[in-house]
């Protein structure tokens, strides 16, 4: 393909970024091993994201999302005998009568809908919230165990190398 | 050569990146002596595709522009299919045809392409009706500049049809070509296009920029572009907020704008500036110690090139093959894959200013060697002539 590596002019000006990236990775590994990122791993993702690594970052995001702030049932259940929203009737012959009739019809339809599916939707949303919360907690436990195992393996490898 | 450049919209002041790219090609090819006309639709908005601009021919900055009316599509069905595509749910060929027809389909433009005696037709980008129907109408002349991203749209049947029908393809970078090979297998004749850059003309005022935006004299990181999740802005903000616990003098300046500025941006280390003039943007690039490009999905990254031209080294997202490639080839920047790497890379870039200047200088040479207008157009003409 024209313009690919073979056709770019000589790159003697190029700084060896691959060598620099080795240094970057070495520094990152030393810091991880020192544990300076451990506390940050537990922080809520939506406030400050602890990007220790992809696994921890993903778990933090899941946990933060599980909080579902402001979650309320989509439809408020109407108590037995609950009334329809009443619009103040307008004078006879005025446009308010037409609007009032439409509003009453809409309110009646909403009440019927609420009674039909409101409770079911509430239960569904509650179930979703419970599932998400439990999933995120499960992920947190799994993540901490995996990272702990990774560290232990690294320690063992180091010990083996010394032997 | 008689050349048509086909882009879905041409509404100066409301151009997307791909359309600006196509228009730039048209102007550059005309300057190089080709007989060029720009073919486009009457649409201004890529959301509604309503015919807002007048149909017919005009001359704009010396370029002949011909606009054709869009045949409106069904927005509800488009939205449903769009959702399924974005979530990688199977769609049929017919559904994809109807989906892509919504994005700037003009039968009159297609007929014009068939009837005219252009030598070559350059079409871009891949995911729109003008490119799809235009390529299929005149495959023997079609040179398609895909502007490909690793996204669900790239995996559609209609995209494969464009690639296999075209006479030749143009890419912004070798990683984009590698992606196309991975997705579509054997490719027709193809070459490297790109956007052209020249050394900046505006005199930058880096000290004034820092003073005007209260950035102080400490280490300054810069982001320029849309503030949205797809561009990696929340990720970048979180990295800097985290790092600022150990580096209290670090500041991240954000120029541009958009919907996704996270709450963490209220921290002292984050300085959202907003949209600025071209001159002020130039000053920002020059004032920065590190230019950050956290996006995973770039086909070229114009702002990365601009940062190098301004003498600033870069730190890019290691998951973006294109920007990582640019850094590797030029020596102009580093990349990160996690927070510890982000922090370590910034420290490395800050602790040796002479080395960082050398890196930026390498990036600048790379931009002018590979992506000057002269170099880009030579390669494009090679594809036009050889294909």
Image (spheres, helix red, strand yellow):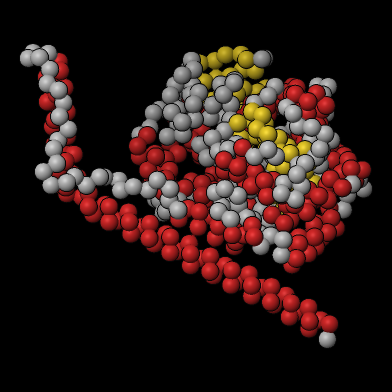
What residue appears at the point 29 percent right and 56 percent down from the top-left corner? Answer: A124
Answer with left or right where residue B345 lies relative to residue A115. Answer: right
> The C terminus of chain A lies in which quarter of the figure?
bottom right
Q: Is residue B225 left or right of residue B74?
A: right
What residue is shown at x 62% (from left), y 22% (from top)?
B37
Q: Look at the picture and state if B140 lies above or below B152.
A: above
Rendered position, B311 above or below A99: below
Q: Position of residue B88 (x, y in %)?
A: 46, 53
Q: Nearer the viewer, residue B244 or A1?
A: B244
Q: How many marks?
A: 0
Nearer to us in this view, A156 or B290: A156
Residue B277 in view in this figure: yes
Location of residue A118 in the rendering, given as x and y in whole percent from the top left corner: 22, 49
User: Is residue B22 placed above or below A30 in the rendered structure?
Assistant: above
Residue for point 56% across, 21% down: B11
Question: Camera-side residue: B332 or A95?
Answer: A95
Q: Indicate the position of residue B377 as horizontal and vertical percent values.
A: 75, 33
């Amino acid at each position: 393909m024209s313009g690919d590596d073979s056709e770019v002019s000589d790159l003697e000006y190029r700084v060896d970024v691959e060598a620099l990236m080795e240094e970057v990775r070495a520094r990152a590994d030393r810091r991880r091993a020192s544990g300076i990122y451990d506390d940050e791993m537990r922080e809520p993702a939506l406030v400050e994201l602890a990007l220790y690594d992809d696994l921890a970052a993903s778990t933090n995001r899941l946990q933060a999302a599980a909080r579902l702030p402001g979650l309320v049932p989509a439809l408020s259940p109407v108590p037995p005998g609950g009334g329809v929203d009443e619009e103040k009737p307008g004078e006879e012959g005025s446009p308010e009568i037409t609007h009032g009739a439409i509003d009453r019809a809409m309110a009646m339809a909403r009440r019927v809908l609420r009674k039909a599916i409101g409770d079911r939707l509430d239960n569904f949303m509650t179930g979703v919230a419970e599932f998400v919360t439990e999933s995120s907690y499960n992920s947190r436990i799994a993540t901490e165990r995996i990272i702990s195992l990774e560290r232990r393996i690294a320690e063992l490898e180091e010990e083996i190398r010394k032997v | 050569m008689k050349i048509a450049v086909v882009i879905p919209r041409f509404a100066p002041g409301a151009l997307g990146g791909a359309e600006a790219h196509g228009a730039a090609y048209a102007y550059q090819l005309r300057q190089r002596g080709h007989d060029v006309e720009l073919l486009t639709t009457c649409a201004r908005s890529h959301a509604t595709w309503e015919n807002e601009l007048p149909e017919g021919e005009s001359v704009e900055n010396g370029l002949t522009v011909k606009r054709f009316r869009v045949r409106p599509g069904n927005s509800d069905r488009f939205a449903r299919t769009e959702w399924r595509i974005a979530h990688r749910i199977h769609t049929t060929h017919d559904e994809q045809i109807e989906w892509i027809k919504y994005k700037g389909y003009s039968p009159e433009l297609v007929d014009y392409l068939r009837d005219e005696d252009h030598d070559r037709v350059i079409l871009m980008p891949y995911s729109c009706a003008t490119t799809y129907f235009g390529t299929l109408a005149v495959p023997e002349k079609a040179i398609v500049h895909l502007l490909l991203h690793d996204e669900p749209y790239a995996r559609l049947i209609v995209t494969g049809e464009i690639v296999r029908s075209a006479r030749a393809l143009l890419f912004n970078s070798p990683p984009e070509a590698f992606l196309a090979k991975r997705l579509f297998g054997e490719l027709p004749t193809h070459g490297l296009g790109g956007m052209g850059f020249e050394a900046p003309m505006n005199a930058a005022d880096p000290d004034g920029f820092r003073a005007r935006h209260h950035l102080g004299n400490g280490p300054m990181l810069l982001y320029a572009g849309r503030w949205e999740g797809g561009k990696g802005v929340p990720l970048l903000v979180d990295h800097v907020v985290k790092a600022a616990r150990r580096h209290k003098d670090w500041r991240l300046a954000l120029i541009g704008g958009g919907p996704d500025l996270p709450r963490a941006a209220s921290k002292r280390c984050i300085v959202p500036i907003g949209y600025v003039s071209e001159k002020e943007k130039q000053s920002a690039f020059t004032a920065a110690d590190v230019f950050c490009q956290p996006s995973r999905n770039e086909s070229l990254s114009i702002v990365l090139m601009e940062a190098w031209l301004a003498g600033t080294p870069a730190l890019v997202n290691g998951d973006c093959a294109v920007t990582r490639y640019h850094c590797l080839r030029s020596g102009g920047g580093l990349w990160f894959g996690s927070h510890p790497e982000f922090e370590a890379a910034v420290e490395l870039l800050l602790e040796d200013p002479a080395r960082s200047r050398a890196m930026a200088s390498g990036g600048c040479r790379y931009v002018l060697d590979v992506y000057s207008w002269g170099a880009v157009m030579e390669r494009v003409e090679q594809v036009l002539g050889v294909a």
